[in-house]
Amino acid sequence: MSITSQMVKELRDKTNAGMMDCKKALTETNGDMEKAIDLLRQKGLAVAQKRAGRATSEGVIETYIHAGGKLGAMVEVNCETDFVAKNSDFIEFAKNVAMHVAAAAPVSITREDVDEELAARERNIFKQQAIDSGKPENIAEKMVGGKMDRFFAESCLMEQKFVKNPDLSIQDLLNELVAKLGENISIKRFQRFQVGA
């Protein structure tokens, strides 16, 4: 199958990947758009993992204040160089993360960062629900594992589905940005503010 410039443009618009990367992905997948998107996302993950150990001492602090001024968020996103810190894609990513934090109210950046008391409380609630529904102990434990995974996916920033595009998690967005900019990028911390909360 011949890969047309229109196909390359469409894939580029969907993924923000480089033109040559898009053409290569379409060639490797015989023009299958969905498979090409998956391939580019996998490559982005590989690049992100390769760069994960590098120090991130530059970056930006971005804020988002929701209309009415009663809800807002502040986020620190780090990168390796001030060159990338000034890049419009990097700044847009930081703004999107701040807006997402305000909307989705994550409790931590990763599941490893979740407060142990909160995790234990959730685990106990899920276990009691399973036992109350008449499940034996061993089945209840398996159910708790699944419910905890769902709790983490809904509560941890990196696992949450991006509010502007539920097909992607925040981790997916970060991986795409790392692949595009070629630097290690990390979300260092965030704070959400709500009047009266």
Image (cartoon, grey):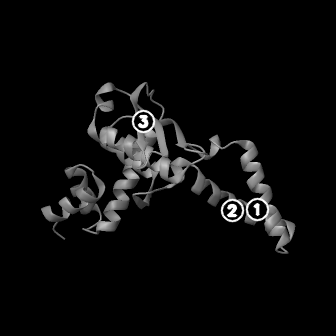
Where residue 49 appears, x then y in whole percent? 46, 41
Residue 196 picture quarter: top right
Residue toward you, 5 or 96: 96
Say which mark, if any, is on residue 143. none
Give SS at disc 3: helix
Disc marking residue 147:
2
Quadrant in the picture for the C terminus: top right
Instruction: Please tell me which of labels 3 and 1 falls first in the chain.
Output: 3
Mark 1 Cα-neighbour bin, 10 Å: few <14, some 14–19, many ≥20? many
Report if the CB atoms under discs 3 and 2 are less than 8 Å apart. no
Picture quadrant where residue 4 is located: bottom left
Estimate the spatial distance between the alpha carbons at disc 2 and disc 1, rounded to whole Å. Answer: 7 Å
Tell me the tag on residue 51.
3
Helix, strand or loop at mark 1: helix
Decide which of tag 2 and tag 1 comes sooner along the chain.
1
**Residue 55 horizontal/vertical position (percent):** 45, 26
- Horizontally, residue 34 falls left or right of residue 61, namely left
Residue beneath label 1, please? 126
**Image coordinates for residue 79, horizontal then vertical, percent:** 39, 31
Q: Which residue occupies the foreground of this view, 12 or 59?
A: 59
Q: How many marks?
A: 3
**As drawn, which residue projects farthest toward the bottom?**
134
